[in-house]
Amino acid sequence: MKHRSIKISIITMIFSILLVSLTANEAAAESVPEWVKNNALWYGQGDISETEFLNAIKFLIETGVIVIESAEDVVAEIMEAEIIIPNGNSDVSGSGFYLPLNLEISENTKVTWVNDDSVPHNIQSQDNMGKVSDLFNSPPLQTGDRFEFTFEESGVYNYYCSFHPWRVGVVTVK
Ligand SMILES: [Cu+2]
């Protein structure tokens, strides 16, 4: 019974979103028959049964008006990228730059830093004045440790290692 009511509220929510978006989209509105829209209203008022209402949803799915995205598809939309902290990264006079030094990604990309160096490092986000900000901050990463952060919004993100502050890197989210 509890599951059913959750299912119904999700369906009602989908319907509300659908109806709201229809007011802004004339073309889409034409593909949803009047009787389906009325069904949503009547269901909300308790004038029709759950079965009748679900049949209306079924109709929209069968006719392709509602497209159901599987959980797998949603996961696939999150992209991934890696930044290597290479061996020798701690050496101030060496060339052990982050690989890549400026990572370019699109929104909703999960970035994983991997410490391939023989000494610990950390990753600290910086504001545009170079001060540590709390957007993403890793604990000390031992050799082989990984740190993840998902960038949701476009922008230029600077970071550095507080143990070796000469090591700065950039993530550019387009
Ligand atoms: Cu470091």
Image (cartoon, rainbow, N blue to C red):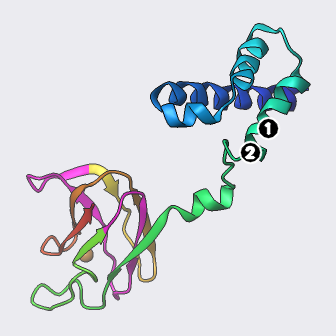
To which residue does mark 1 refer? 59
Across and down, in percent, residue 51 comes to 91, 26
Q: Which mark is residue 63?
A: 2
Q: Is residue 30 toward the left or the right of residue 94 in the image?
A: right
Mark-to-mark CA distance, 1 and 2: 6 Å
What residue is at 21 percent from the left and 88 percent from the top? 96
Judged from the image, the quadrant occupied by ligand 1 is bottom left
Please name whichever residue, 138 or 47, is drawn nearer the observer in this view of the structure. Answer: 47
Across and down, in percent, residue 143 comes to 41, 83
* Range covered by the magenta-colored residues: 105-133
Across and down, in percent, residue 137 comes to 33, 57
Asked if residue 83 is among those painted magenta in the image, a careful observer would answer no
Which type of secondary structure does the marked residue at label 2 adopt? loop
94 lies above or below 3 = below
12 lies above or below 164 = above
Q: Is residue 152 toward the left or the right of residue 15 in the image?
A: left
Which amino acid type is marked by label 2? Thr
Q: Is residue 165 toward the left or the right of residue 66 in the image?
A: left
Across and down, in percent, residue 145 comes to 45, 76
The image quarter in which residue 29 lies: top right
Count of numbered badges drawn on the protein: 2
